[in-house]
Amino acid sequence: MFNFDEIKDMLIYVADDDKTNLRLIRTVLTNAGFENIRLFNSGSSMMVETVRIRPDLLIVDIIMPGFSGYDVLERIKQDPSLEDIPTIMITAASLDENLEPLQRSFELGAMDFISKPFANFELIQRVKSALRMEKQRQKLENAAKQICSLEKLLPICSYCKKIRADKNYWQELETYFSEHTDTLFSHSVCPDCYEKEVKPQLESIKKGK
């Protein structure tokens, strides 16, 4: 079952050039229990802060002077480190007359879309939905990193130095890495082995002469 406590402190950025709209969104979300909301009066200021501190959700007004909501979304999706941030686009344009804002927002990669004026309940539910999905994505990403880390732990024999591979099959170290990576091996002799193995053999050959 969904636990609101898991998302209430996730970081939300809101950008709108209308201060009244900014205060309204913050009030609605704060009253709903969200605790970590930052407001921006331009797309450019939001973008600067997004690069500095990655938020969990962006709520962006489409029509802003200079750096529009479209510009923010396009820049986000071009950055591999930011492209997964869910974005909700907001516009005062009537969808009854023009579907272009809706279409373009989704084409650029927006997660959701809200038309002004919006009902408080609608905003809250859309934010909850976006943050739930982002929380799940983050959990999956962390799980994948842990699996990747575990895969780097290879059982190795303390005596012969063979590696235990799949199906409990023991392989030579060189064979294992050749099969599982693009690594190519060149053979050499370390100083310790030279003194222990090679040098006595060379001295034995000289004595034999």
Image: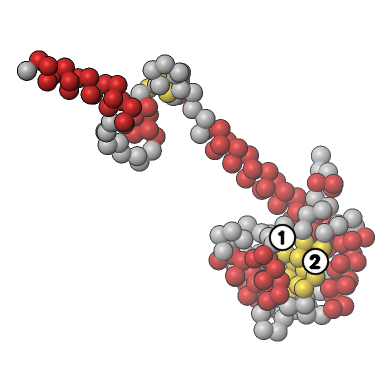
- The residue that disc 1 covers is 55
What is the crowding at mark 2: few (fewer than 14 residues within 10 Å), some, or many (at least 20)? some
Image: 136 above or below 148: below
> In the image, what residue occupies the spot 82% across and 59% down?
36
> In the image, what residue occupies the spot 84% across and 47% down?
4
Badge 1 vs badge 2, beta-carbon distance below 8 Å: yes
> In the image, what residue occupies the spot 44% across and 19% down?
157
- The residue that disc 2 covers is 38
Image: 152 above or below 94: above
Residue 104 seen anywhere in this rendered image of the structure: yes
Residue 90 seen anywhere in this rendered image of the structure: no
Residue 72 position by quadrant: bottom right
The amino acid sitting under disc 2 is Arg
Residue 39 in percent (x, y) is at: 80, 70
172 or 192, nearer to the observer: 192
Image: 170 above or below 141: above
